[in-house]
Image: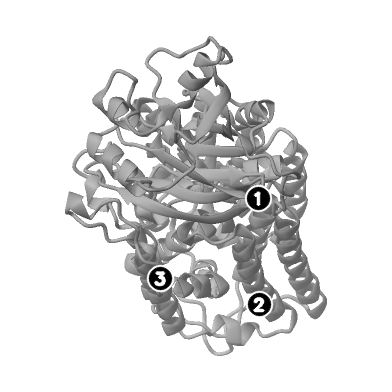
Amino acid sequence: MTAVLTTSAFFLFFFQTLTEFVAAVYAFGLMGTSIPPEIGALVLLLSPFLLLLWRRETPRAVLPALLGVLVAARLALPLLPTRGVLWVGGIGAAAALLALPLLLKRFPATASTLGLAWAVAAAGLLRAAGAGIDLSLSPHGQAIGWAVAALGVWGWPASRREPPAHPAGKPAPAAAPAFGKALAAALGLASVLFLLEAAFAAPAVIARWGGWRPATLYGLTGMALLGVALAWARQRLAAWHNLDSGALAAWAVLLGGGLYSLETTFPTDPAAYPYTPSLPHAGWAVLLAALTFGLLFPAFYRFSAWLYETPPPGRTLGAAFGLGALYLLVLIFAHVCTTTYDYIPVVGPLWRDRFWLVYALPAAVAALAAFLFPGGAPRGALSRNERLMSGGILALLALAMVGLAYARTPRPQPAEGTAFRARVLTYNIQQGYRADGQKGWEDQLALMRQANADIIGLQESDTARLSGANNDLVGYFAHALGMEAYYGPPTVNGTFGIALLSRDPILDAHTVYLYSKGEQTAAILATVSVGHRPLHVVVTHLGNHGPMVQEANLLQAIQGLAPVVLMGDFNFTPNTPQYRRTVETLRDAWLVARGRGSANPYLPPDPIDHIFITPDLTAPQAAYLPPGPSDHPALWAVVRGK
């Protein structure tokens, strides 16, 4: 039982260090919108090749040393700037990948699999507690990391490896296992860990695939984990671990097909825009996949049981798990390319509109690999009391995750009164980073609180992805501000994200897409009840240089609507044809306020963030707030009916 504490701490720290490392590498590319030299740090993830240094067995001191490096790196992460996170997180992730095969050789597969399930539930619980971000990585939750480390260290002394038991009459294998089977196990393990890290350990990430409420996905993944807990507690392990590999193959089809149905097929004709896609008919498949993702744990058990019972020599492990790490690196890079395809030459465009493939591929690999390994009753099973305790702990973690997710769902109260007046704010948050590349969402939240806006439009807000450390900043801001939120375009469509937050009820909201040759762009069209009257609110983020075709699409989308507030990062300045065309029918709220003598005198050089209003509205006040928390200034304006 104590061994489960060590394995669960290992997997939780592995997920956290790898996710933070990938996000830090991405942050340097974000600042330069190009391939950063820091991408070279990704070579750290190929650390399992170091096992080739040992022909037979690695020295016993190697595994505890690697675990010590992982723990030290994880505990240091909340204290470091972005560059420090990149190198320390990278070293921690490298240590975890190098330790993984050694850990699975030492611990019975029952302990490793249950530890993984605990880690997934704990990861979801920490994100539910943080309203979208990992609470243990925030300045207020660092003690949680220390507590997890202490539990992991406490479980280590009782984790001595004992020779695996073999069925009567079947002697232990005399020959070293084939490299092909070791490679299949490594690829299967990498596939399972990628799927858990990139999605199921952070349910809000899945919610942003299809525009569902995050609490719904926390509920579904919690139910899946409760099913796993029940299997442990009621001694249904034989049936659970002996699930036909075909079930996992069917699950892979369910996940890949569901994601494929969620992606939008964009027209190639500019005349077809602004484009509003029809709602997908098979989005339910993704929800069902979230409810049944527990199938990944029997597959993980099969791979880890084989390594425990038939441990390959050091060089076989090094070659197999080195290639498994390379495969994991390819999956991570492909995932990043689904959004950054316009900035990564040659390779990037191959992944445009192929988000589904990033998940269908590892799901298929895990299913194919599982066919090579037998199921059957687990060996090294826990006692009845241990089963009840371990299953109960998993159930408690899952229930706490679901409960916190629902408790921290914002329930805004509409403003009293009938005045048709609202303070609106537009803000490009640069995916939660400051202008200097440091994490900045706490400062961004402080700025939003200072602005005291009723309606907020965010750009570059699609952080609920692996490259954004799986942080659901839209959910985090909405909870902290007590606002209702509409996320905007789902992450499967590869945009840089726009979102709408409102204290007043959002009566209707949908996403329209604009014609794009490079990065895909979109706009949110919503109706907000202000003083019991409808106000049309539009949030957008145009492509580089604010293409005229996109602004024309946008103006066409709002044609005939009134009153309208159109705000966002337009990527064009007041001296451009796009701006002049816009003010033919709309008015610049900052200029309206300046004409009344109530605009803040600060004006950024070449402003590209704007708030436009229809002539039936006026703007008695407006102000740009200097950049710092982001690389963009925020702009707010008070708008009211005439």
Residue sitting farthest toward the top: 601
Which residue is depicted at the point 33% across and 50% down?
A: 513
Separation of marks 2 and 1 at Cα, in angstroms: 45 Å
Q: Could you tell me which secondary element the residue under label 2 belongs to?
A: helix
Q: Camera-side residue: 57 or 404?
A: 404
Q: Amino acid at mark 2?
A: Gly
Q: Camera-side residue: 211 or 426?
A: 426
Q: Camera-side residue: 461 or 244?
A: 461
Q: Could you tell me which secondary element the residue under label 3 belongs to?
A: helix
State yes or no: discs 2 and 1 in contact (Cβ < 8 Å).
Answer: no
Residue 139 placement: quadrant: top right
Circle count: 3
Residue with the mark numbered 1: 532
Q: Amino acid at mark 3?
A: Gly
Q: Amino acid at mark 1?
A: His
> Which disc number belongs to residue 227?
2
Residue with the mark numbered 3: 258
Which residue is depicted at the point 35% across and 48% down?
A: 557
Which residue is depicted at the point 77% across and 77% down?
A: 383
Q: Position of residue 45 (x, y in %)?
A: 42, 43
Q: Could you tell me which secondary element the residue under label 1 belongs to?
A: loop
Q: Position of residue 321 (x, y in %)?
A: 41, 55
Residue 638 placement: quadrant: top right
